[in-house]
Amino acid sequence: MLISSMGVTNASTRSRTAAAKAELDLKHMRELAAFTARSLKTERPVPFGSSIVHTKTGELLLRALNAVAKESDPSSHAEVRAIRLATKRLKNPSLAGYTLYTTCEPCPMCMSTALWAGLDRVVFGATIEDANHHCRQIHIHATEVAERSDMPCPVDGPLLRDECYALFTHPNMLKAFKEWSTGKRKATRAK
């Protein structure tokens, strides 16, 4: 039995709290995967989506998709875009009190941005290895980036890995990956 300032906390209460947190994580990841899947029906499909959620209330702040091609900006990964949009919306560079959900394990740039923003947690779906089957990746796991930092931020995942990896294997996404790797889309626009 643990004693806290709120009174007595037993294993049953902690178990219920952990189960509620796990259910909330599943809900947010399912919603994010569905949001991201909508892009698969557009001219610029992307499998990378992120959302920022208030850690205690579970209230969604915002969602964002990868926009590297759309914005011609190699830093416009879904996680970085979500963090940029959230800090602007809140008018605060700190996202303490918020959790980042992402359909794919954050790359080192994205995880570093999450750390600098002071996020409470990061929860991801597909892994870097999953993404690497289809596009280039930096093979440093988000947990390693977090562990090498003096900024605490637990990284949980993979969660709903199969559902999130399905975003990468959708026929429209596979076609887009092929175009990305051959530069076909870029050559078509240049004409």
Image (cartoon, grey):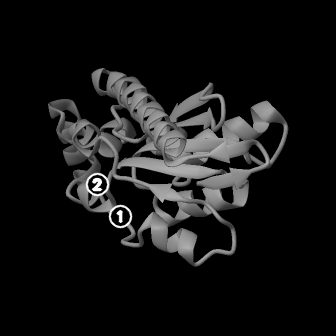
The residue tagged with tag 1: helix, strand or loop? loop
Q: Is residue 158 above or below residue 12?
A: below
Residue at x-position 36% and y-position 29%: 30
Q: Earlier in the sequence, mark 1 or mark 2?
A: 2
Outermost residue, left side? 171
Left or right, residue 157 beside residue 83: left
In the picture, the quarter occupied by the N terminus is bottom right
The answer, for residue 78, to whether it is visible in the render is no
Q: Nearer the viewer, residue 37 or 181?
A: 37
**Tag 1 near tag 2, CB within 8 Å:** yes
Q: Inspect the image, locate mark 1, and give the three-letter code of the amino acid beneath it.
A: Gln
Nearer to the camera, 168 or 116: 116
Q: Position of residue 133 (x, y in %)?
A: 20, 57
Question: Along the horizontal axis of the image, is 127 left or right of 78?
Answer: left
Q: Can you identify the residue that label 2 sits on? A: 131
Q: Is residue 31 visible?
A: yes
Q: Tell me the residue that label 1 is attached to.
A: 137
Q: Say few, some or many: other residues with alpha carbon within 10 Å of mark 2 (under 14 / 14 to 19 / 20 or more).
A: some
Other residues around mark 1 within 10 Å, as few (<14) / some (14–19) / many (≥20): some
